[in-house]
Image (spheres, rainbow, N blue to C red):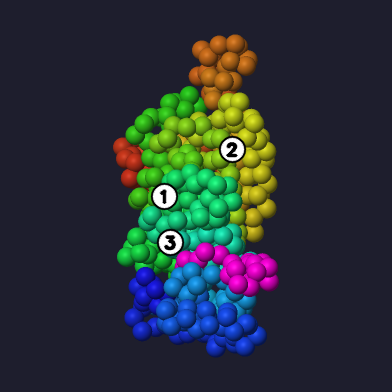
Amino acid sequence: MSARELAEVVLDTGSFESWDQPVDVNNHSAEYQAQLEAAGQKSGTDESVITGRGLMRGRPVAVLVSEFGFLAGSIGSATATRITAAVRRATAERLPILASTASGGTRMQEGAPAFFEMVRISRALMDHKAAGLPYLVHLRHPTTGGVFASWGSLGHVTVAEPGALIGFLGPKVYQAIHSSPFPSDVQTAENLAAHGVIDGVVETADLPILLDRALGVLVDPATTPALVRRTGEVVDGSGWESVVRTRQTDRAGVRELLRYGCSGTVRLTEPDASVLVALTRLDGQPCVLVGQDRATARELGPAALRQARRGMRLAEELGLPLVTVIDTPGAELSAAAEEGGLAGEIAQCIATMSTLRVPTVSLLLGQGTGGGALALLPATTVVAAENAWLAPLPPEGASAILYRDTTHAPDLANAQHITAPALRVAGIVHHVVPESSDDTPESLAVALAAECASRLVN
């Protein structure tokens, strides 16, 4: 698919307006000029990228699209100047940028000066992101070299087309240097998505759907909350009973919150599925949601906490509220977790979240065990379900420390002030949402979504 064809797929019909200025080739050698002329005749473009603005489902956006048919989409000085100018203009006009790459990297005919242009492009994009403006990236086949290592890897959301070759060092170059083929199935879109390098693999026909959802969160204004907040008194009951209830397999978790309380959700990369990161609208309120997923029944390791921190940074960069959902049996206890810097990752999450400048809401949904829970807790507003709880260790662990057995777990759960009402008295929780004996996962999720969304409005 050519650059113009892709623009036609993504943008509203007839809305594209080119920003490109004519390219001056007079300072190049006659041989290189001939190559550029032949490339132009082959591709129908005067350079390896087209830029401009258009409408995406009615929303103004800037676009940067590689044309692989022009010298394999390589980046020369004129290409970089065009990209940088477009990024600067998009920033000045406060437009989101949609970028689609297909490139072998730096243009070898121009050497080091063209190679350095990747720095200039990256600087412009970082200024764009620092202005709180979205940058969305679509990687096409192939995207390699300096393009992947610069503007191809700086997106707030990054997806690739199925089967695309995506990698830093092209396999032909690797084989020429090392006299052996590059391992197969490594530099593929699917493998990189599985390892969390990119956020997903998307068919070109589905790209408008993804972009519409993402921009619906990133650009569209909030709407008036529609869900009804739940009222009523809560009583501080048995801590052990709360522990037992939150461990039931049919209790609502973050997935139910997304299903019944959110809309327009775009799930981001999940190399460790024990933490979900999503762009979403919580009862009409755009936000970044970071949630611990009870469905995996996994403790949180360093990778999961790094994933959570990505969501925190994303909220700060985009100027979106952050909602964290706490529901975890605790942090991972293993040699690999210790060697992976588990304690440091917990500390970094606490520090990052404590210093965010965007509105933050933490939802204590179920189990709140140890450092894994504390990592997502320090929000401006903390909401808790009535049976949610927070403790430095699971009651069985506390019993093992104090009594060298687990039989005292119920007594310690009742004595350690771990319940949501007790946490409210202590000033840790700001609002407790009552639970009903006939709650379903849907009804509880809706009630919690309504309360959290109201806190984003107020």
Q: Earlier in the sequence, mark 3 or mark 1?
A: 3
Say above or below: 411 vs 222: above
Badge 2 marks a residue whose secondary structure is helix
Residue shown at 33%/45% (left/top)? 442
Look at the image and give the residue range highlighted in magenta.
Answer: 99-124
**In the image, what residue type sits under mark 1?**
Glu
* Amino acid type indicated by mark 3: His
In the depicted view, which residue is nearer to us: 253 or 50? 50
**Residue for badge 3:** 141
Label number found at residue 190: 1
Question: Would you call the spot at circle 2 few (<14 residues within 10 Å), some (14-19), or many (20 or more)?
Answer: many
Q: Nearer the viewer, residue 173 or 375?
A: 173
Disc 2 marks which amino acid? Pro
Q: Is residue 117 visible?
A: no
Q: Is residue 375 left or right of residue 224?
A: right
Please tell me which of labels 2 and 1 falls first in the chain: 1
- Look at 53% across and 19% down and name the residue there: 396
Callout 3: helix, strand or loop? strand
Query: Which x, y percent locates residue 83?
Result: 57, 75
Q: Please identify, in this view, whether the residue under mark 2 or under mark 1 is nearer the observer.
A: 1
Q: CA distance from mark 3 to mark 1?
A: 12 Å
Cα separation, mark 2 vs mark 1, equals 23 Å
| C-alpha separation, residue under disc 3 versus residue under disc 2 | 32 Å
Mark toward the viewer: 3 or 1: 3
- What x and y, as percent, mark residue 107? 58, 70
**Number of residues whose C-alpha sits closer than 10 Å to that of mark 3, classed few (under 14), some (14–19) or many (20 or more):** many
Dot label at residue 302: 2
